Image: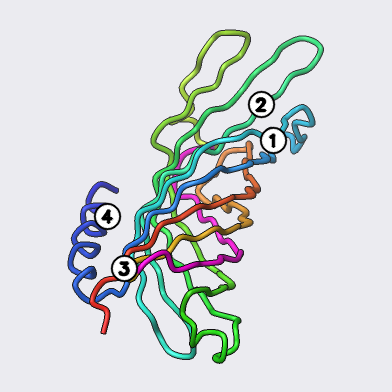
Amino acid sequence: MKKNYLLFIILFVSYQVFSQEIFFNTGKNFTKYDYKDSSGQSNFYLQSGVGSFFELGISKPLKNKTFYAIGLSLDDYNAIGSNSVISYRWDTKYLGINSELNYSILPSTILLNKNFNFFIKIGLKGATIIYGKQEIDGVYYDLVKHKEFSGIVLVPHIGFQAKYSISSFGFLSIGYNFSKSLNNSNVNGEKLSFDTNQIQLGIHFTINKN
């Protein structure tokens, strides 16, 4: 796993020379977990949790108003819950690599202005947990080694993004993603997945501009 992230960093640095944009996104994740125990019973007491999101990436234009973006992300996927006996919460951090296609849906006549653009996005993220704590009535447990949390999590997502030029060298953006996790590495009886609504704010720096 460490070798994979080292390879990504090398590719990231080399790809900058040929990319058109470097971007930094941040925002909030609103996550709803779906947990089933070994007997297939769901935990109905889990509620949506709120966490932070960060991404550093690079983007390059393709053909037909399409852009390809790749980035390194850090996501908090959190949850809370309680019943008549106990209260508990999950706090987790996932490090991932996000690959995404962005397609501009604005007519060419509007794009001539180049101050505003609107994109539909579709992508896939591969992530792994790097930090996880479960709190049950003030007692903390490590989640990193739990099988239902471990392994590579695939997170397909779809969303939109609006960008507005702030100067000759960059843009500001606001966006939204909806994602659903897929974890096929779980071989024990317990199953865990989560849906996330993500609100994004971003800053984009144009480079190698002709």
Mark toward the start of the polypeptide (2 vs 4): 4
Q: Amino acid at mark 3?
A: Phe
Say what amino acid the circle numbered 1 marks: Ser
Say which residue label 1 marks: 48
Between the residue at mark 2 and the residue at mark 4, the CA separation in whole angstroms equals 32 Å
Q: CA distance from mark 3 to mark 4?
A: 32 Å
Of the two numbered discs 2 and 3 on the same chain, state the one appearing first in sequence: 2
Q: Report the mark closest to the observer, 2 or 4.
A: 2
Query: Badges 2 and 4: C-beta atoms under 8 Å apart?
Result: no
Going by the numbered disc 2, the residue's amino acid type is Ile
Residues in magenta? 149-167
**Which corner quadrant holds the C terminus?**
bottom left
**Tag in front: 3 or 4:** 3
Give the numbered dot on residue 4: 4
Query: Is 69 placed above or below 64 here?
Result: above
- Disc number for residue 80: 2
Label 2, label 1: how many angstroms apart (C-alpha)?
7 Å
Q: Residue at x 22, y 65 (%)?
A: 11
- Please provide percent x and percent y for residue 19: 28, 74
Mark 3 highlights which residue? 169
Nearer to the camera, 89 or 147: 89
